[in-house]
Amino acid sequence: MVAIPNDRGLLGQARTFWTLWLLGMAGVFSLLLVALPVEGLSAVPGLSLIQPIVLLTVMTWLGARLASQVGLRLPLITALYERRRVGPVLRSQLLTASVATLAVFIAMLLIQAWAEPQLPAAYLAVNENAETLLPPVTRFLYGGITEEILMRWGLMTLLVWLPWKLFQKGSGAPQPIFFWGAILVTALLFGVGHLPLLFSLVPQVSGFLVAYIVGLNALVGIAAGWLYWQHGLEAAMMAHILFHVLGLVIQ
């Protein structure tokens, strides 16, 4: 793990908040390119972005306020702000993210090959046309950056911080079980978060298909959560983007 200075001060929190909020907003605006309605409001451009903007603002603030208290980090962004060498941090994060991505992607391919005969034809048809529904720029910016800010930086950080304050009274480093609990819960919620889109695209959804979608996305969430814990949020973002890159190449 790369040690970084404590960033609990108000100035540091504000700097972190605005950096991640602006990065996340790039992903939010990329939703305008999606061919599907966002919360049924796509007929009014911009109005459909209100909910993601509010969520992004809340989760970015939570992470900026709580992450440093539990040892969760932004090594690459911190190095940039402090004008330290970013090469070693970038190489370390990218290497680890690449290895984790490749391992999980291979596991996902094996699961897909096993599950495909049991998946409904309507889902397989939609999956083949996914590229036209979700353009690469949205996958990379919203999926790879904004979703990581929402799920890891905001939600996972909060789920580590809460038991740390409750059971350790905010003293010392949080126990590993707090991190693993937060990783698993966040990964499960990340998987569940993909169900509304599934229900909107596939007329009849089976229990097997629900478990399949939740499980595959939860695998990505577990990898991203572990990377965030051990190597920083940027590593989780890199892995998430790489998943989409591999998905586009294989598709």
Image (cartoon, helix red, strand yellow):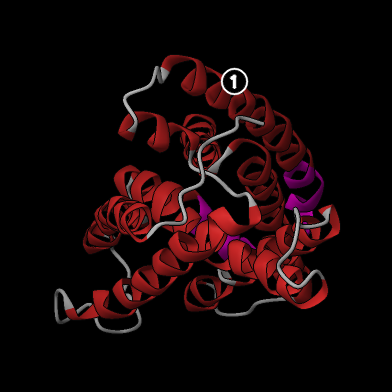
Could you tell whether 117 is left or right of 8 in the image? right
Disc 1 target residue: 95
- 129 or 31, which is in the foreground? 31
- 138 or 91, which is in the foreground? 91
Could you tell whether 234 is left or right of 169 in the image? left
Q: What amino acid does circle 1 point to? A: Leu
| Residue sitting at x 40%, y 64% | 60
Q: Quadrant of residue 64?
A: bottom left
Identify the image quadrant of the N terminus: top right
| Residue sitting at x 73%, y 46% | 112
Callout 1: 10 Å neighbours few (<14), some, many (20+)? some
Residue 203 point in image, percent of width and height = 55, 79
Residue range in magenta is 111-127
Residue 206 point in image, percent of width and height = 73, 76
**From where the camera sits, is residue 124 visible?**
no
| Residue sitting at x 41%, y 36% | 78
Vertical comparison of 189 with 44: above or below: above
**From where the camera sits, is residue 8 visible?**
yes
